[in-house]
Amino acid sequence: MVRRRLLPMAVVTSIVSIILVACGGGAAPAPATAQPASPPPPPPAATPTAPAVPGGSGSSGASTGGTQFEVTLADPAGSGSYEFKPDNLTFKVGETVTFTFNAQTEFHTFTVDDLGIDEPVDGGSSSTLTFTFDKAGTFELICIPHEALGMVGTITVQ
């Protein structure tokens, strides 16, 4: 009778031992070293040329004259509020404007699809764009990565 009780116990013990040996063993893995969290690099800045586009023409780089205009691409630290300052701009048909864009801490764009404007600005830096407004109308201004967060504006050309 003792033998009948010991046999199942021996079988269970053997199976458990085999499982433990198969699943365990070996040296303990080396602890993972923490990597410092770093944000992904911003997309590479495109260098626009001065193509003839309907509604105007533009170029990046040094000022070529005309009206000087500064736009801040604002993202107040931690506020979650993204905005162009100013966000409503008005120009005259034929006016040449040299924009200076100042991005505070994040990558932004100054994009007006209907005018062929798409100027990237890395966080903490500035960018310059000279553009001649040849087409009258009201145009939507957006920051591509922050449009859904309300970073929009209007350009009116009279």
Image (spheres, rainbow, N blue to C red):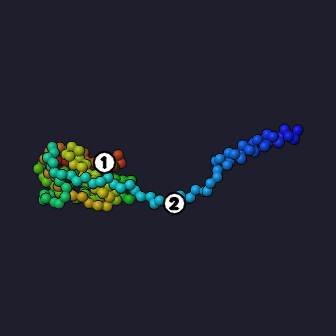
Q: Position of residue 103 (x, y in %)?
A: 30, 58
Residue that appears at 19% across and 58% down? 61
Residue 8 is situated, as x and y percent measured from the top left of the image, at 79, 39
Residue at the spot of label 2? 33
Q: Residues within 10 Å of mark 2 (few under 14, many from 20)?
A: few
In this view, the residue in front, 81 or 42, is 42
Identified at 34% across, 56% down, the residue is 106
Secondary structure at numbered mark 1: helix
At which x and y percent is residue 73?
A: 29, 56
- Please give the name of the residue rendered at 31% of the width and 61% of the height, measured from the top-left corner: 124
Decide which of 96, 39 is in the foreground and name it: 39
Q: Which of the two discs, 1 and 2, labels the residue nearer the N terminus? A: 2
Among the 4 quarters of the image, the one containing residue 38: bottom left
Q: Residues within 10 Å of mark 1 (few under 14, many from 20)?
A: some
Residue at 30% across, 48% down: 144
Residue contact at pointers 1 and 2, CB within 8 angstroms: no
Mark 1 — residue? 144
Callout in the foreground (1, 2) = 2
Question: Residue 115: which quarter of the image?
Answer: top left
Q: Is residue 14 above or below residue 61?
A: above
Determine whether, in the image, residue 154 is placed left or right of residue 75. left
How many numbered markers are drawn?
2
Type of amino acid under label 2: Thr
- Residue 62 is left or right of residue 10, and the answer is left
* Mark 1 residue type: Ile
Instruction: Give the CA separation, mark 1 to mark 2.
Output: 36 Å
Q: Is residue 34 left or right of residue 90?
A: right
* Residue placed furthest toward the right: 1
Residue 9 horizontal/vertical position (percent): 79, 42
Return the residue found at the far left. 94
Name the one closer to the observer, 54 or 155: 54
**Residue 89 relative to residue 43: left or right:** left
